[in-house]
Image: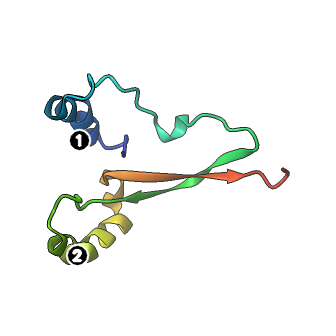
Amino acid sequence: MNTLNPLFRFYLSYIFPFIHNIDDGTETWLHPRDWPAVSGARWSEQMDFITFIPDFLPKRLIFALGKLEQRLERSKLKSFSAHFAATLVKDSTN
């Protein structure tokens, strides 16, 4: 989940646990600048922000909104996406 998005942090901390009764909402949120060190690798500076359209929508609607989602993922609004992907790069010396 995109921990940079305060809306998702609120949802995952308070609403999701209440609705699904699965945990108490006391997660520790990792900021991308705080990824743990990994021996023999480094975290890439590039992060991909993905997913604006929820997967619980009808498939026809997801398909119809696909182009909009692609535009949002490339826009200045991308940091408000639901997810982000960080890349771990293996050191070339290993």
Q: Position of residue 48 (x, y in %)?
A: 46, 59
**Secondary structure at numbered mark 2:** helix
Closer to the camera in the image, 77 or 7: 7
Q: Nearer the viewer, residue 6 or 59?
A: 59
Judge left or right: residue 76 versus residue 93. Answer: left
Element at label 1: helix
Relative to the observer, which residue lies in front, 15 or 9? 15
Q: Residue at x 27, y 59 (%)?
A: 52
- The residue drawn where x is 38% and y is 68% is 74
Residue with the mark numbered 1: 7
What residue sits right under mark 2 in the picture?
Answer: 63
Q: Which amino acid type is shown beneath numbered disc 1? A: Leu
Q: Nearer the viewer, mark 2 or mark 1?
A: 2
Residue 25: x and y, percent?
27, 25
User: Which residue is depicted at the point 26% across and 41% down?
Assistant: 8
Q: Assess disc 1: are there few (<14), some (14-19) or many (≥20) residues with their C-alpha within 10 Å of its C-alpha.
A: few
- Amino acid type for the residue under numbered disc 2: Phe
Q: Quadrant of residue 9?
A: top left
Q: Residue at x 15, y 72 (%)?
A: 61
Q: Position of residue 12 (x, y in %)?
A: 26, 36
Which mark is drawn over residue 19? none
Mark 2 burial class by Cα count in 10 Å: few <14, some 14-19, many 20+: few
| Quadrant placement of the N terminus | top left
The answer for how far apart the CA atoms under marks 2 and 1 are is: 24 Å
Task: Find residue 64 and report its image quarter.
Answer: bottom left
Could you tell which of marks 2 and 1 lies nearer the N-terminus?
A: 1
User: Percent from the top left, x then y, of residue 4?
Assistant: 37, 42
Residue 16 figure quarter:
top left
